[in-house]
Image: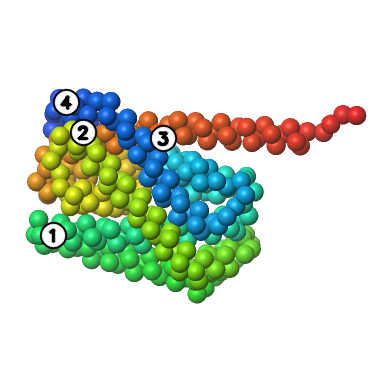
């Protein structure tokens, strides 16, 4: 993944060289201190997204909305800056929930179902972005092929949900990968008891799933609002439809570029490519992409430091409790 990160940096540098760093820098300077508004806006976006997560967890003593917002930021920062293929943040969040006293099965079930809801919404919003884009660019073979691929992805996600409900994710993994390991002389996989029942129980409560989806969709619209704010700060004329298309398809680009830490270079190239299709100045799109990257750095790096500090405190407390007392 280090090689992919270097390649992403190279792509970003190449785009700046091709489009000219000066006009991009002028856009960033035009936004100026207004870029600081992206920090509280991102906080609100994550707070909305984790509201759906909290709905799945249910009322928990010691697990506040503010704590979950911090956990959501930790998830984002780990997935963005560390070479974990955009899934390590979920494992970190589950570990931190466990340290706050949440049962393992409940923590895993909430993350599995929330991730499934997010995947479904992401495919739907991406299809919506493509549908809005077709009248503007025409039904090119590449765009139609992407739409067909997304429909296939939606079917795969639906099958993933069906497996969780009908079979149980743990049981399915044991029947497939676990059986293969046993055939090779291994001992199978250590499964978490109760997780399938918790997941199935959440899927049997459609009202909770709809509330989770509502908050996830609110978070998506908040991400689109970030693009609109940046366009306003930089005096870039973007319509609401263009903003929606940018956000929907850039989110899809992030998902498929999981091998590149933080989608470095891929995010910037995606903005530029979409701008060319939508009739937006490519250097303007690159300015928006780099401003978003600056926001990721401004929030993500301090959040990673706070996570490590919290881990150190918990380890120190555990060591102190485990140390024998003299007497």
Residue drawn at x 36%, y 40% is: 42
Q: Is residue 264 visible?
A: yes
Marks 4/3: CA–CA distance: 25 Å
Which residue corresponds to mark 2?
233
The outermost residue toward the right is 327
Q: Earlier in the sequence, mark 3 or mark 1?
A: 1
Q: Earlier in the sequence, mark 1 or mark 4?
A: 4
Which residue corresponds to mark 1?
134
Marks 3/1: CA–CA distance: 35 Å
Q: Earlier in the sequence, mark 4 or mark 2?
A: 4
Q: Mark 3 near mark 1, Cβ–Cβ under 8 Å? A: no
Q: Residues within 10 Å of mark 3 (few under 14, many from 20)?
A: many
Which residue corresponds to mark 3?
300
- Tell me the quadrant of the picture where the C terminus can be found: top right
Residue 221 position within the rendered picture, expressed as x and y whole percent measured from the top left = 30, 50
Residue 151 in the figure: left or right of residue 104? left
SS state under label 3? helix
SS state under label 2? helix
Residue 154 position within the rendered picture, expressed as x and y whole percent measured from the top left = 33, 66
Which residue corresponds to mark 4?
26
């Amino acid at each position: 993944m280090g090689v992919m990160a270097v390649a992403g940096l190279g792509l970003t540098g190449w785009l700046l060289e091709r489009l000219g760093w000066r006009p991009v820098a002028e856009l960033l300077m035009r936004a100026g201190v207004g870029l600081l508004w992206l920090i509280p806006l991102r906080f609100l976006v994550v707070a909305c997204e984790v509201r759906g997560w909290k709905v799945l967890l249910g009322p928990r003593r010691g697990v506040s909305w503010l704590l979950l917002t911090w956990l959501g930021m930790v998830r984002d920062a780990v997935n963005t800056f560390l070479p974990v293929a955009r899934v390590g943040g979920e494992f970190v969040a589950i570990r931190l929930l466990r340290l706050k006293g949440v049962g393992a099965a409940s923590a895993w079930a909430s993350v599995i179902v929330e991730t499934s809801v997010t995947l479904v919404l992401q495919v739907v919003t991406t299809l919506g972005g493509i549908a809005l884009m077709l009248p503007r660019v025409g039904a090119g073979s590449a765009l139609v092929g992407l739409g067909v691929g997304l429909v296939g992805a939606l079917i795969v996600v639906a099958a993933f949900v069906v497996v969780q409900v009908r079979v149980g994710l743990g049981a399915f993994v044991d029947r497939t990968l676990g059986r293969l390991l046993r055939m090779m002389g291994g001992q199978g996989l250590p499964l978490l008891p109760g997780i399938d029942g918790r997941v199935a129980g959440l899927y049997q409560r459609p009202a909770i799933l709809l509330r989770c989806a509502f908050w996830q969709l609110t978070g998506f619209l908040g991400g689109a609002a970030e693009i609109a704010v940046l366009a306003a700060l930089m005096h870039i004329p973007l319509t609401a439809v263009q903003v929606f298309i940018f956000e929907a398809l850039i989110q899809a680009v992030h998902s498929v570029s999981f091998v590149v830490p933080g989608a470095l270079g891929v995010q910037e190239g995606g903005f530029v490519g979409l701008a060319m299709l939508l009739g937006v100045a490519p250097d303007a799109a690159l300015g928006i992409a780099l401003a978003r990257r600056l926001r990721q750095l401004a929030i993500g790096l301090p959040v990673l430091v706070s996570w490590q500090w919290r881990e150190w405190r918990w380890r120190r407390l555990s060591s102190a409790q485990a140390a024998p007392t003299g007497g």
